[in-house]
Image (tube, rainbow, N blue to C red):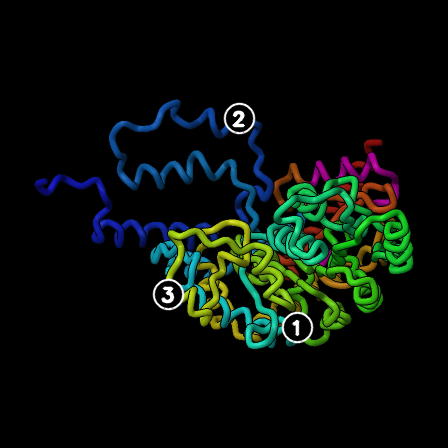
Amino acid sequence: MTESKSYHMSPYEFRKQGRAVVDWIADYYENIESYPVLSQVQPGEIRKSLPESPPEQGEPFDAILKDIRDKILPGVTHWQSPNFFAFFPANTSGPSILGELLSAGLGVQGMLWAASPACTELETHVMDWLVDMMELPGTFKSSNTGGGVIQDSASSASLCALIAARERATGYASNERGCDGRLTVYTSNQAHSSIEKGVKIAGIGRENIRLIGVDDTFAMSPEALQAKIREDRQTGKIPCFVSATVGTTSSNAVDPLPDIGRICREEGVWLHVDAAMGGTATLCPEFRYIHEGLEYADSYCFNPHKWMFTNFDCDCFYVADRATLIRALSILPEYLRNKATESGAVIDYRDWQIPLGRRFRSLKLWFVIRYYGIEGLQYHIRRHVELARNFAKWVEESDQFELAAPVPLNLVCFRYVGGDEINQKLMDRLNQTGKLYLTHTSLNDRMTLRFCAGQTYTEVRHVKTAWKLIQETAKALKAEC
Ligand code: PLP
C-alpha cells in the first residue's frame, strides 16, 4: 500500500485552531453578561438554521467556528452566566476546562488499570484527597475497606449503590435469578427523581419504592421511615436500601442522618447518602454539620460538577465496603484479562460503574484542587452561601415576598405573596428579560421560586440587580392585575 493523502488536521493547524478556540472561550467569558441567560429560541429554530445534509467535502475550521457564534450560540442557555440562578448550578472554571482539554488530548479510555495506570491512580489519589478535604468517614479511603470512584452523574452513583444493596440483601442471588418483587427501597418524598429511576433500572420495581414523609423543614421523618420498614417486614418484604439526601433539590433540606443511620444499622439496610449539591459545602468546616451521621453510610455521592468549579460531568461516589460493590458489578470476559488485574494489586474501575469505558475525569478535578487550593475553594463556597443568605434576608424584610423554606446553604426558596398564578407569571416574565434565570418547584403544594447562588462568577452586584428586578417586575405585574 502506498502512502495516501490525509484528511487529518496537522499538528500545525491544530496549534493554530486550538489557540483560536481558547481565545473564543476567553472572549465568551469576558462577554457572557451580554447574552440573554435563558436561550430565547423557539423549538426547531436551531435545526432550521442548519444544512439539511452533512458536507461531502471537509470545511475550513474558521467556517465551523463562525457557525458556533452565528447558529449555535443563540440556542445556548448560559449556565456560566453570573446571572444564572436556576436549578442547581453546573459551574466550571479555567483550570477545569483546561484539564478537560488535556483529557480529550490524551484520549485515554481508562477501563482497566492496565489501560492507563495514571488514569486509575490519579483518580484514587484525588478521591482520597477529598476524603481529607471534606472530613468524610475514614472507611471511604482506598487504604481502608472502601474507596471512591468518579461517575458521570449522581444518578449513576445511586444506581450503582442500589445494585450493590440489592445484591447484598439477596446474598448475590438477584444478579443470577433476577428480583422476585420483595425488595423495598425508601427515600423521602423530596428525594431526587434519579432514585426512582434507579429503582426502575435496577429491576426492583416502582411499586416497591416508599416515599417517606417529611417534617416542616422538608427533611425525612425517621419515625415514618422506621414504621414503614417494620410494616414491610411484617408483610414479607425485604427492605434493602434507604437513600437520604443532604441538600434536596427542591429546598436544600438536610435529612437527619444520625437517626436514619441508626435505623439502617439496626435493620441491616444499606444507607446511601445523596449530597449531589450540598456535599461541596463541607469543604468548609463550618458546614460539616450537614454530614453528621455520615459514618453510618454504606455509600455517598456529591457532584463537583454542580458547585465545585469542575465542569460537567464529575460525580464523586464513595463506598464503605468496596468488595460488595465490585462483587455486584464485576464481570471479566477473556479479552479483558491481564496480569495486573490477576495480581490483585490494582484497581480496575470498570467494576465500580455501569459502563465499561471511562474518561480521564480526575484530571480536571486535580487541576481545580491544585489551582484553587483548599483555601480558594473555601473562599468561593463561603461567598456563595453569604450571597444566598443576603438574598434571603432581603426576602424576609420585604412585606411583598416570603421565604418558603429554611436556607441552610446557597438556595433560597421564596414566593411573592399573591398565589401561584402571579408567581408563575413573575418567573416567566423575569426569564423572558434574559437578564437572569430562575426556576421553580412546589413546596406544600404551592408554586415556589428558587434562587440558587453557585455560579462561579456571581458577585454581590449580580444578586442586588436580580433582587431589584424581581421586586420591580412583581410590582408591575400587580399593577396590571
Ligand atoms: N441528587 C440531587 C439531590 C440532585 O439535586 C440532582 C440534580 O440536581 C441529582 C441527584 C441528579 O444529578 P445528576 O445530574 O448528576 O445525575
Classify mark 3 as within 8 Å of ligand 1 or not, answering yes or no. no
Q: Residues within 10 Å of mark 3 (few under 14, many from 20)?
A: few
**Left or right for 184, reference 37:** right
Residue 175 on image: x %, y %: 62, 49
Q: Which one is nearer the viewer's eye here, 166 or 310?
A: 166
Q: Quadrant of residue 409?
A: bottom right
Q: Report the magenta residues as a range.
A: 410-430
Circles 2, 1 touching at the beta carbon (< 8 Å): no
The residue to which callout 3 is attached is 339
Select label 3 or label 2 by which is in front. 3
Residue at 83% over, 46% down: 443
Q: Quadrant of residue 261?
A: bottom right
Label 3 to label 1: alpha-carbon separation:
33 Å
Q: Amino acid at mark 1?
A: Leu
Locate the N terminus by quadrant: top left
The residue to which callout 1 is attached is 136
